[in-house]
Image (cartoon, helix red, strand yellow):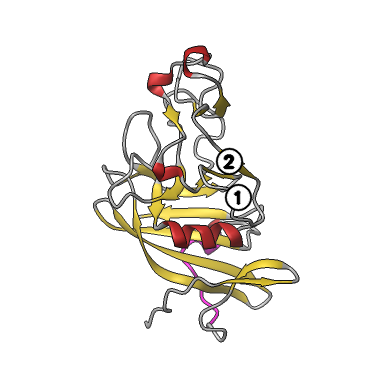
C-alpha cells in the first residue's frame, strides 16, 4: 500500500493554526488504533520498527473517517525499546494509548490548543516514588525541593525545547514510572520517552487540541 508522503504544514486561518492534509484528497483509512481511542479526533501513532527506532504517523478524524495528516516521521523511543508496562528506572517506552494533557518547553509557547508551560532552571518532574509529588511537575530551587531531585528530572535541558506530557501512570502509582514525554530529539534513544525533530514537533503542537491521544505499539 502506498504510504502518504510526510507533510506537516502549519496554516494560519480564522480558526487558528491547523495541520493540512497531505494530499488534500487523502483517502479514508482504518488505522490500527481505531477501536482503542473512543471518540478522539486526533491521534499521534508511534509504531516500533526495531530497537529504539520507530515511525510516527499523525491522524485526524472527521465526518468521513480517519485520514493521515502525516506519515513516516523518524522517531526515537527508549534505549530498551518498548514495553507492555512502564516501570521506574527502566528505559523502555510503554505501549498503549495515552492522553496528551499539556505541553511545555524551554522555548516560548509556539501556539496551539494545549496548555503550555515555559520552563526554566527551577522546573522539575518528580520521579521520587516516596514523595506525594511523584509524577508531577514541580517548581522549586534544588536545595528546597520537597522530593529527591536525584530521582527526578530537571526540565531545563535541550531535549525539552518543546515537549508534550504523555499521560503514563496517571494514578501516580509508585514504581510504575514517571516523566514520559513526547519531546525534541537529540538524535539518540530516549530514557522511555518518544522523540522527533523539533521543527516537526512544533507543527504537531500547533495542531493538537484537548482530547488528542498518542497510541504506541510494537
Q: Is residue 127 left or right of residue 165?
A: left
Residue 153 in the image, given as x and y percentages of width and height: 43, 29
Q: Which residue is mark 2?
A: 118
| Nearer to us in this view, 160 or 171 | 160
Secondary structure at numbered mark 1:
loop
Q: Are marks 1 and 2 in contact (CB under 8 Å)?
A: yes
Which percent across, then down, holds residue 14? 75, 71
Q: Residues within 10 Å of mark 1 (few under 14, many from 20)?
A: some
Image side of residue 151 versus residue 134, left or right: left
* Lower sequence index among marks 1 and 2: 1
Asked where in the image residue 191 lies, by quadrant, the reply is top left
Residue occupying image coordinates x 33% and y 49%: 186
Residue bearing the label numbered 1: 109
Is 36 part of what is drawn in magenta? no
SS of the residue under disc 2: strand
Q: Position of residue 112 (x, y in %)?
A: 64, 57
Q: In the rendered image, which quarter contains the C terminus?
A: bottom left
Q: Residue 1 sits in which quadrant? A: bottom left
Is 29 one of the magenta-colored residues?
A: yes
The residue lying at 53 percent from left, 28 percent from top is 172
- For the record, the magenta segment spans 27-35
Amino acid at each position: 500500500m502506498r504510504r502518504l508522503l510526510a507533510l506537516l504544514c502549519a496554516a494560519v486561518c480564522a480558526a487558528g493554526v491547523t495541520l493540512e492534509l497531505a494530499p488534500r484528497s487523502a483517502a479514508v483509512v482504518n488505522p490500527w488504533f481505531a477501536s482503542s481511542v473512543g471518540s478522539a479526533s486526533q491521534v499521534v501513532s508511534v509504531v516500533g520498527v526495531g530497537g529504539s527506532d520507530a515511525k510516527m504517523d499523525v491522524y485526524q478524524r472527521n465526518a468521513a473517517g480517519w485520514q493521515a495528516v502525516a506519515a513516516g516521521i523518524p522517531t526515537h523511543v527508549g534505549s530498551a525499546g518498548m514495553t507492555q508496562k512502564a516501570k521506574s528506572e527502566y528505559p523502555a517506552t510503554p505501549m498503549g494509548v495515552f492522553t496528551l494533557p499539556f505541553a511545555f518547553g524551554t522555548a516560548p509557547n509556539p501556539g496551539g490548543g494545549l496548555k503550555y508551560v515555559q520552563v526554566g532552571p527551577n522546573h522539575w518532574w518528580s520521579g521520587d516514588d516516596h514523595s506525594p509529588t511523584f509524577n508531577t511537575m514541580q517548581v522549586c530551587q534544588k536545595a528546597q525541593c520537597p522530593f529527591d531531585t536525584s530521582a527526578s528530572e530537571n526540565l531545563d535541558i535541550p531535549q525539552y525545547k518543546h515537549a508534550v506530557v504523555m499521560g503514563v501512570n496517571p494514578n501516580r502509582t509508585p514504581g510504575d514510572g514517571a516523566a514520559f514525554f513526547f519531546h525534541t530529539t537529540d538524535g539518540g534513544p530516549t530514557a522511555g520517552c518518544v522523540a522527533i525533530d523539533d521543527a516537526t514537533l512544533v507543527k504537531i503542537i500547533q495542531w493538537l487540541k484537548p482530547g488528542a491521544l498518542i497510541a504506541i505499539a510494537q
